[in-house]
Amino acid sequence: MKTSGSISKELREKSGFTVEEVIEKLKDYHIAITPEQLCGYENGTDSIDADLFLILNQIYGCPDILEAFSDSNAVQNIPPLDLKHLQELSAEKMRNPM
């Protein structure tokens, strides 16, 4: 069974990025995670927030998230979008850019 993490790993590999390269690219977005955290998400042992999910798909050049993740059961592992929380995070990042 494919999960959102395993699909994300496939997208990363198809785009030619190593875990370390993705970690470096995330710094451009002021996101600092460890290789273990990214691998944990890809392997299904850790969850991921909506912001990171969207940014990873942007880095991987995924043109259609719904199509890529519409495989049965994959979408179930994506946390629900909390618009208020995203707005708060966005406002905080605007106040405190790295």
Image (tube, rainbow, N blue to C red):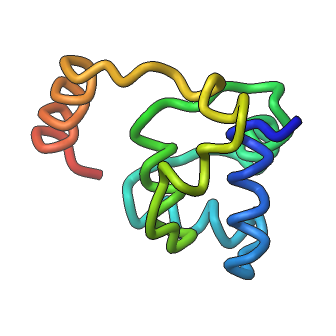
User: Horizontal and vertical percent for residue 28?
Assistant: 40, 66
User: Horizontal and vertical percent for residue 42?
Assistant: 78, 44
Does 46 appear above or below 8? above
Residue at x 48%, y 43% (from the top left corner): 52
Residue at x 51%, y 67% (from the top left corner): 62
Residue at x 18%, y 32% (from the top left corner): 92
User: Horizontal and vertical percent for residue 84?
Assistant: 19, 18
Front-lying residue, 26 or 15: 15
Does 10 appear above or below 46? below
51 with respect to 46 (left or right):
left
User: Horizontal and vertical percent for residue 90?
Assistant: 19, 37
Instruction: Residue 3: name its quadrant.
Output: top right
Front-lying residue, 81 or 73: 73
Residue at x 69%, y 35% (from the top left corner): 74
5 with respect to 27 (left or right):
right
Q: How many marks?
A: 0
